[in-house]
Image: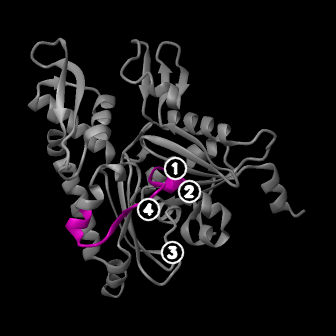
């Protein structure tokens, strides 16, 4: 057994989607083994972490004065380095098989337009979380691979990865990026738009979880054949007392108009910048959308109307980035063409 095989036997290499809303970890040979909210519950009095992930999410908006639920990532990048490191260490530990003593090789999806400082923060967090080697993959590239697009062919493939913090758009050909663009408008922006709309139009203050629930239950990008409604609870702006109101699908759709316009404009701009030789490929292949926000009702139809191209929602939209990172681990060619290695000393290296 050579040294590489020995390392593989005693370690569990991991693909990580370090997302604003959720962190997913793919373990080579086992699939998705961790799928947790990107949250940490911290006791401000003792400075001790009380919970991670799902347990911490249950505390969001309900915590006692000394307990705060922290979201370590904002708009797809690290906002709190210490909490991100501790959270990543916890999730990597969860993903490791018992008895595997060698640190894992890790592929992490990052926003395509993340700057050097933002990438460095992710790398440092991964190394401090006991990674052996860290490879960075643009999220749109990982999503395209996870969705099964033939990115290695000399034809164009287009993916729009709609996460919680960012929307990453990429046109790929021959395992490379022909065009990439990112807007920091995505799922969380939709939630915030709902909060603001209900505050100003219905005079009710609601929390993030309530807004997210309304988006999931009745949100849509185009009118629905059967209008929906949902009850939401919050605090009256005028009276200061708890109140429950009924919100319609039409109201939520109106609230989402602004951020959805930003996303559709970015997609149209991407198409305008594709070389003419590749445009015909997209007429045939269309666009695939991934990420949690891709599941918004009729978003695929709206993008189809805006672009004139077929639009498909990936069947594994919620896990496409993690699945793509995992497939890179299992295919040396994909790994070498789709990532760059982040060195422990802060530099980068070709693989």
The Cα atoms of the two marked residues, 2 and 3, are separated by: 15 Å
Q: What residue is shown at x 24% (from left), y 26% (from top)?
A: 232
Label 3 CA crowd tier, 10 Å (few <14, some 14–19, many 20+): some
The single residue placed furthest to the right in the displayed view is 1
Q: Which residue is mark 3?
A: 150
Stretch in magenta = 303-322
Going from the N terminus, do you reach mark 2 or mark 1 first? 1
Going from the N terminus, do you reach mark 1 or mark 3 first? 1
Q: Is residue 153 above or below residue 55?
A: below
Foreground label between 2 and 1: 2
The Cα atoms of the two marked residues, 1 and 4, are separated by: 11 Å
The Cα atoms of the two marked residues, 3 and 4, are separated by: 14 Å
Q: Are marks 2 and 3 in contact (CB under 8 Å)?
A: no
| Left or right, residue 270 beside residue 329 | left
Q: What residue is shown at x 16% (from left), y 13% (from top)?
A: 240
Residue 126: x, y in percent? 59, 46
Foreground label between 4 and 2: 2
Label 2 CA crowd tier, 10 Å (few <14, some 14–19, many 20+): many
Dot 2: element: helix
Going from the N terminus, do you reach mark 1 or mark 4 first? 1
Label 1 CA crowd tier, 10 Å (few <14, some 14–19, many 20+): many
Q: Which residue is mark 4?
A: 140
Q: Which residue is mark 2?
A: 323
Q: Quadrant of the C terminus?
A: bottom right
Residue 24: x, y in percent? 54, 45
Q: Are marks 1 and 4 in contact (CB under 8 Å)?
A: no
Dot 1: element: strand
Q: Which residue is mark 1?
A: 17
Q: Can the viewer see residue 350? A: no
| Left or right, residue 212 beside residue 229 | right
The Cα atoms of the two marked residues, 4 and 2, are separated by: 12 Å
């Amino acid at each position: 057994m050579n040294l590489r095989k020995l390392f593989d036997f005693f370690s569990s290499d991991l693909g990580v989607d370090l997302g604003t809303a959720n962190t997913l970890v793919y373990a080579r040979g086992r699939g998705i083994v961790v799928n947790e909210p990107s949250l940490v519950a911290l006791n401000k009095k003792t400075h001790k972490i009380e919970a991670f992930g799902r347990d911490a999410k249950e505390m969001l908006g309900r915590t006692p004065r000394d307990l705060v639920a922290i979201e370590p990532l904002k708009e797809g990048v690290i906002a709190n380095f210490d909490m991100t490191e501790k959270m990543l260490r916890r999730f990597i530990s969860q993903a490791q098989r018992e008895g595997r003593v060698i640190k894992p090789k890790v592929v992490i999806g990052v926003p395509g337009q993340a700057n050097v400082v933002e990438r460095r923060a992710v790398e440092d967090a991964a190394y401090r979380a006991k990674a052996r080697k860290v490879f960075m993959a643009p999220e749109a590239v990982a999503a395209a691979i996870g969705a099964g697009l033939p990115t290695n062919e000399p034809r164009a493939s287009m993916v729009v990865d709609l996460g919680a913090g960012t929307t990453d758009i990429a046109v790929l050909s021959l395992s490379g990026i022909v065009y990439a663009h990112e807007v920091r408008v995505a799922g969380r922006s939709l939630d915030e738009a709902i909060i603001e709309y209900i505050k100003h139009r219905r005079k009710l203050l609601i929390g993030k979880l309530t807004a997210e629930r309304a988006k999931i239950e009745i949100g849509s990008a185009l009118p629905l054949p059967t209008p929906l409604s949902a009850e939401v609870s919050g605090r009256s702006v005028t009276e200061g007392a708890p109140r429950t109101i009924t919100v319609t699908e039409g109201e939520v759709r109106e609230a989402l108009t602004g951020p959805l316009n930003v996303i559709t404009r970015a997609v149209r701009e991407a198409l305008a910048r594709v070389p003419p030789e590749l445009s015909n490929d997209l007429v045939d292949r269309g666009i695939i959308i991934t990420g949690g926000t891709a599941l918004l009702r009729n978003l695929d139809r709206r993008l189809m109307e805006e672009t004139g191209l077929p639009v498909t929602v990936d069947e594994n939209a919620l896990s496409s980035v993690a699945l793509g990172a995992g497939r890179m681990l299992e295919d040396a060619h994909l790994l070498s063409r789709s990532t760059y290695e982040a060195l422990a000393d802060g530099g980068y290296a070709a693989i």
